[in-house]
Amino acid sequence: MRAALLLPLAALVAGCAEADAAAGRGERGAPRHDGVETRLLDGDLVNFHVAMSGGAKAEDVIAYAECAAAQYALIRGYGFARHVRTQLDESAGNWRADAVYTISPALPEGLRTIDAEVTVQNCGLNGIPTV
């Protein structure tokens, strides 16, 4: 009977040791996507406020904003978006991005263009929610 109790205890201790090792390697938990607020600024200019927590990094919140912009473009019947600017803020592990994109039916000029359909598909493959 005593051996039966030791096996679950050993598994528990091993799990704690692995969690401690992961923390020591700097591994993070799964980032949480905490929501998107969308505001139409002008006919084709859109502002996105996105929030993340749970070990998110700057690149995670930037990708979340891009996914929201791509989905929004599709919802409005457009196929493309162009990044205008993103402002980031981090406090106590909580990230916020204030991002502005233009949306358009044709590929816009500029270097930071987004094919909305392809981007939304990639967001789904990467587990990033859209609008």
Image (cartoon, rainbow, N blue to C red):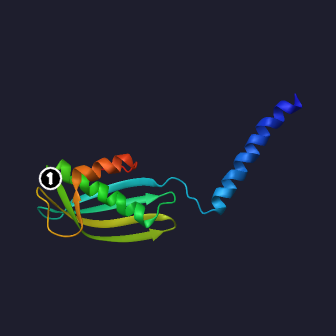
User: Residue 58: x and y, percent?
Assistant: 42, 66
Q: Amino acid at mark 1?
A: Tyr
Q: Is residue 30 left or right of residue 99?
A: right
| Quadrant where the image shows the N terminus | top right
Q: Is residue 78 left or right of residue 94?
A: left
User: Residue 30: x and y, percent?
Assistant: 51, 52
Local crowd at mark 1 within 10 Å, few (<14), some, or many (≥20)? Answer: many
Q: Secondary structure at mark 1?
A: loop
- What is the quadrant of residue 115 in the picture? bottom left
Residue in the image at 33% along x and 50% along y: 122
Q: Is residue 68 left or right of residue 12?
A: left
- What is the quadrant of residue 60 in the picture? bottom left
Residue in the image at 20% along x and 60% along y: 81
When the figure is inspected, residue 73 is found, relative to residue 112, above or below; the finding is above
Question: Which residue corresponds to mark 1?
Answer: 78
Residue in the image at 23% along x and 59% along y: 114
Q: Is residue 77 left or right of residue 5?
A: left
When the figure is inspected, residue 90 is found, relative to residue 128, above or below; the finding is below
User: Residue 112: x and y, percent?
Assistant: 24, 67
When the figure is inspected, residue 7 is found, relative to residue 118, above or below; the finding is above
When the figure is inspected, residue 8 is found, relative to residue 38, above or below; the finding is above
Residue in the image at 79% along x and 42% along y: 10
